[in-house]
Image (cartoon, rainbow, N blue to C red):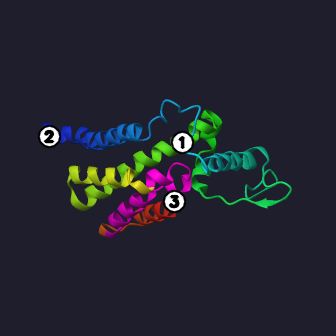
Amino acid sequence: MNIADQQRPSIRRQGHALPLTAYAFLTTVVTWPVVPRFFTHIPGGGDAAWFLWQLWWFKHALLDLRQLPYRTDLIYYPLTDVPVTSQTPFNEFLTMPLQVAIGLVPLYNVLFLLSFVLSGYFTYLLGMALVRRRSVAFVGGVIFAFCAYRGMRGLGHLSLLTTEWMPLALLLAIQCWRRPTWQRGAATGIATAL
């Protein structure tokens, strides 16, 4: 094995670490002051509190009350048995263990910040699959992750902010189209469902 072959894995890792780090840095700058207020505040107003409540209710209903989280009498008094819609069921289900471990406000902020980082990174990977130029792929990731729509909607609508799955689904669909396997098809279906 020659030296060039031994260096390839680190170059591949570096190819992922650099854009991830850059998107994390840009997310910190663009969303300032979320990071210094990580444990005490959630970004945005209006419906942000509703999404925070939905994260809490989903966990509370399933783990504490041992019931389905789609009805409650805790809101809209004097109505009882109010239907509750889940706009981000994947986030709510996946984050239940984290909610217990780190708390509700930090959990919301993790989802908020990760949506920017992963939207940029998955768009970067999609760009690399299409144009194979790091600079173009990186700029595409920046444009998608920090576009005006995400900036405006992200300050109160967690369901509209979680766009990271769209470029991932497109990337997996392209990979499945180029080299179809049942695993790639399943991954594409899962990413599309998210």
Between tags 2 and 3, which lies in front? Answer: 3
Residue on which disc 2 sits: 4
Q: Position of residue 142 (x, y in %)?
A: 32, 50
Q: Nearer the viewer, residue 71 or 63?
A: 71
Q: Position of residue 34 (x, y in %)?
A: 49, 36
Of callouts 1 and 2, the N-terminal one: 2
Q: Amino acid at mark 2?
A: Ala
Q: Nearer the viewer, residue 188 or 28?
A: 28
Between tags 1 and 2, which lies in front? Answer: 1
Does residue 65 show up magenta in the picture? Answer: no
Does residue 171 show up magenta in the picture? Answer: yes
User: Would residue 103 appear left or right of 110 to someone viewing this image?
Assistant: right
User: Would residue 30 appear left or right of 97 to someone viewing this image?
Assistant: left
Q: Is residue 24 above or below residue 184?
A: above
Residue on which disc 3 sits: 194
Label 2: how many Cα within 10 Å (few below 14, some 14–19, many 20+): few
Range covered by the magenta-colored residues: 150-177
Q: Amino acid at mark 3?
A: Leu
User: Would residue 98 appear left or right of 69 to someone viewing this image?
Assistant: left
Q: Residue at x 29, y 55 (%)?
A: 140
Q: Amino acid at mark 1?
A: Pro
Q: Nearer the viewer, residue 123 or 14?
A: 123
Label 1: how many Cα within 10 Å (few below 14, some 14–19, many 20+): some
Q: CA distance from mark 2 to mark 3?
A: 39 Å
Q: Position of residue 153 (x, y in %)?
A: 50, 54
